[in-house]
Amino acid sequence: MTATDAAMARTAPLPVAPSGDLAAAVRSALDTVRDPELDEPVTDLGFVERLEVEAGRVVVRLRLPTYFCAPNFAFLMVADAYDAVSSVPGVVTTEVVLQDHFAAEAINQGVAARAGFVASFAGEAVDELDGLRADFLRKAVLAGTDRVCRALTAAGRDRAELAGLTLGDAPAGADRERLRARRHELGLPAGDGDPLLVDSWTGAAVPAGELTRHLGLARLTRTGQEANSAVCRGMLRARYPQVAEEEGRS
């Protein structure tokens, strides 16, 4: 299963306490929260175990594939979920609860206090997570580049042409817009008239002489990302058998 296919194979709707339009708006906000490494929404991955919405009070319960998932990745997802839900009009209080994780207490308390990663892991963490987030966005740009380039070559474009194409030359659709969004998040050129192939650090167009190396790195990044996604999905289902049942009802 490719990442694109996986993104379409959504989990069953989250169990929610009744609150009409507010619950739907909160769910939509959670759809924007991504696993930083896999570049997929936590809702698609099955990481949201339950969403409780009542009278403006929202509780989000998260679950991860293993007890020892990297705490920095987990912190980003919990913090991003908190920010996304808190921004929804009508939400009065937000609580995000990471469950069944060795660092859950530190993460939950740190996010609730808006303390940041270093303060939440005092004496253990030395840096905040902005650099880590940017590194994963660069990988997402590379993976997305491979997806749109594969679509172009499948449509008959010669690989040698790719260095001269623009982002607007890529087939319209979810993969192109996903790539555009990741480039925009990094501050890279993301308009239709901007180069299709750019350095994920500088935003400079990739020269024809670097085409083979760049496309090889993009392909390797995409296959690694999709392999990790498949492993995480499998581990989550092994740890929480009800996930497969939820998907079967979707």
Image (cartoon, rainbow, N blue to C red):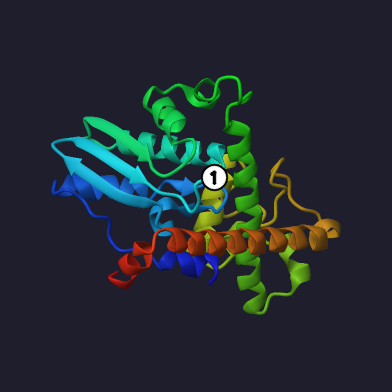
**How far from the left and from the top, in percent, is residue 73?**
54, 41
- Residue displayed at 55% across by 20% down: 122
> In the image, what residue occupies the spot 67% across and 74% down?
153
Please indicate whether residue 157 sits to the left or right of residue 186 in the image: right
Question: Toward which corner of the image does residue 242 lie, by quadrant?
Answer: bottom left
In this image, 231 relative to 8: left or right? right
**243 or 141: which is nearer to us?**
243
Mark 1 secondary-structure assignment: loop
Residue 102 percent across, percent down from the top left:
49, 39
Rendered position, 233 above or below 99: below
What is the number of callouts on the image? 1
Between 27 and 152, which is closer to the camera in this rendering? 27
Q: Is residue 60 above or below residue 94?
A: below
Report the quarter where the C terminus lies. Answer: bottom left
The foreground one among 196 and 41 is 41
Residue 79 location, quadrant: top left
Residue pointed to by mark 1:
68
Q: Residues within 10 Å of mark 1 (few under 14, many from 20)?
A: few
- Going by the numbered disc 1, the residue's amino acid type is Phe
| Residue found 46% across the figure and 63% down from its top | 238
68 horizontally vs 237: left or right: right
Residue 45 position within the rendered picture, expressed as x and y whole percent measured from the top left: 44, 57
Q: Residue 165 appears at what percent x and percent y?
A: 68, 62
Q: Going 21% across and 30% down the picture, which residue do you hit?
A: 92
